[in-house]
Amino acid sequence: MKKSKSKSTKKQAELRLVAPADAHALIREALRQELHRATLQMVYRLFQDEITALCGPRHARDRDAEAVRGGSEKGSILWDGKRRPVRRPRARDEDGEVTLESYAALNDYDLFSDEVQQLLIRGISTRDFSEVTRKLDDDLPLSKSSASRAFIRASQKDLDLINSRDLAGDEYCVIMIDGIEKAGTHVITALGFTTQGHKRILGLREGASENSAVVKDLLQSVLDRNLTTTQYVLFVLDGAKALRSAVKAHWGDQAIVQRCQLHKIRNVLSYLPKELQRTVERRMRNAYEMKTYDQALNELKKLIKWLRDRSDKAAGSLAEGLEETLTVHRLDLPALLRTTFRSTNPIESIFDKVKTRGRRVKNWKADNQLARWSASAMLLHEKKFKRIKGYRQLPKMIASLENLAVDKDKMVA
């Protein structure tokens, strides 16, 4: 009588009869099945080891056992990001049901939290998550609550990572600070630019940009994590006085402030009727595009004079901190660097990613939710950061910062 072929021999025979691409698919599927089978075998061995430790060997009448067997029931474990059905053994003692530590651990050990996070950050809401996993796999899918818990854990890790990672090893010459707001909650973010032209998220804090204590706490955290800067640092800020106050508190005269030109334009336009907004925006943008400090300042002063007859508030808004909006002109930066550092656009583009990723969130709550979402989206985006355009001109900018600081007549107040 001929012996039947082994399963491995049959599998090899099947592989010889298919195209290479199909063979790869068969191999992947075979490996997946073997991994699944081996994992379940390990899980059941853990269950049986614990039951034996609690109740003694099967059929043995151990009077000193902590508990007695109570059959089994349907359960599930979280493995490879999905709920996998298992039969879990039960045990009872004089107080009732005994929780198997191995079963509890296998439900908490979320190997798939990073992938859950990626899907949610890319715009899949927890409401849709079960349907997505159902389409991907016939096993029990993660529920909305399971996906939410997985994302909370993973996003909290991202927030902790951003706010704790060591910043030593790079030297920073520019720091941008700006905030994002959702449902009354603000997240203040610091973005650093190294002397080599690389960008890095330095830290996040929840709280309004008008709150000096929040910003000071953020900057102190950055310094505590070994931030190294050039002697003079260019800070690109919006118009919030608390931001400027916090920066000056930590860096003093070593901080050279560039007020965001786009924030200034928005602030001025907010005081104007619609029929004037287009004209004023065009004139302000044209002024900021001028190559020299004197040219830009003269055009803006003309605009202030023109506005006096139309809106005192708009004129006052433009005049307030005007020269700090022209710091990049004072520094005589090359065109590419001036474009990068004249506004907080680089950090606002990151905020746009946060807003896009979080567009499916219907109810923003407390407990660092916005900060966690921001951290996860920012870290995902940070991996794609490229060197800024014109980074080879950064040594010239660093020298200009020193010259501007030394020249008391041109010192930015």
Image: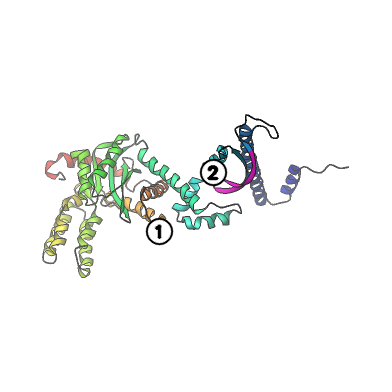
Q: Position of residue 366 (x, y in %)?
A: 35, 50
Give the amino acid at mark 2. Answer: Asn
For the point 15% across and 43% down, which residue is it? Answer: 411
Asked if residue 66 lies in the magenta stretch, the reply is no
Q: Which of 239/300 is in front?
A: 239
Relative to 101, is 276 above or below?
below
Residue closest to the far front: 94
Quadrant location, the C terminus: top left
Q: Is residue 171 left or right of residue 69?
A: left
Q: Which mark is residue 71?
A: none
Left or right of 264, for residue 203: right
Looking at marks 2 and 1 on the same chain, the residue that comes earlier in the sequence is marked by 2
Magenta segment = 69-86
Dot 1 corresponds to which residue?
A: 362
Q: Nearer the viewer, residue 43 or 321?
A: 43
For mark 1, give the secondary structure: loop
Quadrant where the N terminus sits is top right
Question: Magenta stretch containing residue 81, yes or no?
Answer: yes
Q: Residue furthest right?
A: 1
Give the amino acid type for the residue marked by disc 1 in the picture: Lys
Q: Nearer the viewer, residue 143 or 159?
A: 143
- At mark 2, the secondary structure is helix
Q: Which residue is mark 2?
A: 107
Horizontal and vertical percent position of residue 307: 14, 64
Q: Few, some or many C-alpha atoms within 10 Å of disc 2 (few <14, some 14-19, many ≥20)?
A: some
